Amino acid sequence: MALNARLNLRQTQSLKMTPQLLQSIKLLQFTQVELEQFIESQIESNPLLKQTSREDEAYADRDAGFGSIQDRTSNERNTDWDNSELEVSAAAISDKLDSSLENIFPDDPGNGDGAMPDQLKQAGSASGAAPGLPSSRNTDDEYTLENIAQSQLSLREVIEQQTPFIFKTVSDHAIARELTDALDERGYIELDLPAICERLNCEEEDVLAVLERLQSCDPAGVFARNLSECLRLQCERNHRLDPAMNALLDNLELLAKRDFKALGQICGVDDSDLLDMLGEIKRLDPRPGLRFEASSTQAIVHDVEVSQTPDKSWRIELNSDALPKVIVDRQYFNEVSGSKLKKEEKSFIADCMASATWLERSLDQRAITILKVTTEIVKQQDGFFLHGVSSLKPMTMKMVADAIDMHESTVSRVASNKYMMTPRGLFELRYFFTVAISGTAGGAEDHSSESVRQRIRDLIKEETVQKVLSDDALVDILRAEGIEIARRTVAKYREAMNIASSVQRRREKRAQQASEQKHH
């Protein structure tokens, strides 16, 4: 059979993720900080994007017309710039971006106004904006001297400021610098005497003498070689390092086990004095160097606010401060498109308008989707907002997705790094999605794992010296309340909440009771 080349025409179907759709999906799961950074980068590269303040008239007009996305799209098609030489209609934008503006998220059915939550359809506040959407209030922060953060010194800089007052000779300064460089983030030091002596050509006694003087630096506890020495240095600074405390610090493993009987015999004190010593240790800092570490944490900006109305229903609003303040500068577009442009310039300005319009609609769709998901969460977890954690119901993302006719992956993106401000505090959206623990036989309903944890915490908090609950006892109580749970699950929840075992809790309560009786 001869081999030859020939042409075949074949028609196939494939699913491709366009850059614009991928951008919309990323917008949905961005955190507030990531969203601001992304918008700033888009504004730098697109001359038609404009970041506005709350008092900007154009932004206020956009707020007032945000209630219907399709209505606003229809109005845009009738403007002067839409009839100009450059075609930027919805069809043209879709052709240029190879994506449909009717369905920004591939997981979202995208039914226009029909997909909008009830909060967006209702009448807004007195300003005319829809509930949950930004108003035209001016919230620009003024730059004041108090708002400028003072640079924080590192642990090494703090030590170097003190060493000139401690050491006088060049050799001691060299050893001190070497030891300071060996400090870890906790303020501890792993002392390798032979290596230091070889590098600096000095004796071990000289290094130990410098180390002892460095241990007098602030903060107390730095240059310790282990936890016991760190606590000992702080006790010595507080004039609390007596023989009993010294013996206690040598047996920290017994203290972790709450073996007060053995500790009392080793230290030669009774339970009352032992509890006082334990209180002293709890007030010490086991990692004194961490206070000088620069924190990279960002302040949490909640995305949604939940408040109760006078008629006992719940009002869900998007946080206006968390919504991006960006619009398409159509006035500048009209000025540019009205002038004579080259072919490549026309193509560039058309691409900028298409990208800017897509971004604006993607941000609108992002706000709508977040509000739809949080509205359903509040609806299904109404008991939590009324009665607290004990009334938290088991809920999965699929349950929310089915209720609002979305895909589960879309709900997962919305719940990622989004926060809800409620009358009971600030919660991440993922907090409300918990696994179910089956009820006991007899038709009892399922229970949320978070509410079970809270119940275990409450039961342990109500313990007395005479009745300390073991894990088996906790299982019996929970089963009597209609919660079917295994002992290993109770132990896992207890350890995750950093609660000691029943043996350790009993020892601590007995020692505390003996101390109270002695004082009385």
Image: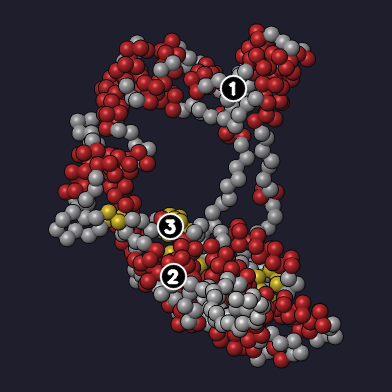
Who comes first in sequence, dot 2 or dot 3? 2
Mark 2 residue type: His
Indicate whether 502 appears above or below 52: above
Find residue 488 and report its image quarter.
Answer: top left
Circle 2 Cα neighbour tier, 10 Å, few/some/many (<14 / 14–19 / ≥20): some
Who comes first in sequence, dot 1 or dot 2? 1
Horizontal placement of 25 versus 195: left or right?
A: left
**Residue at numbered disc 1:** 190
Residue shown at 68% from the left, 42% from the top: 150
Who comes first in sequence, dot 3 or dot 1? 1
Q: Position of residue 408 (x, y in %)?
A: 43, 67
**Residue at numbered disc 2:** 407
Residue shown at 54% from the left, 70% from the top: 366
Residue at the front extreme, as displayed = 1
Estimate the spatial distance between the alpha carbons at disc 1 and disc 2, rounded to whole Å. Answer: 53 Å
Estimate the spatial distance between the alpha carbons at disc 2 and disc 3, rounded to whole Å. Answer: 16 Å
Q: Position of residue 423 (x, y in %)?
A: 41, 58
Horizontal placement of 367 versus 439: left or right?
A: right
Q: Nearer the viewer, residue 151 or 419?
A: 419
Circle 1 sits in a helix, a strand or a loop, which is it? Answer: loop
Circle 3 sits in a helix, a strand or a loop, which is it? Answer: helix
**Residue at numbered disc 3:** 430
Tag nearer the camera, 3 or 1: 1
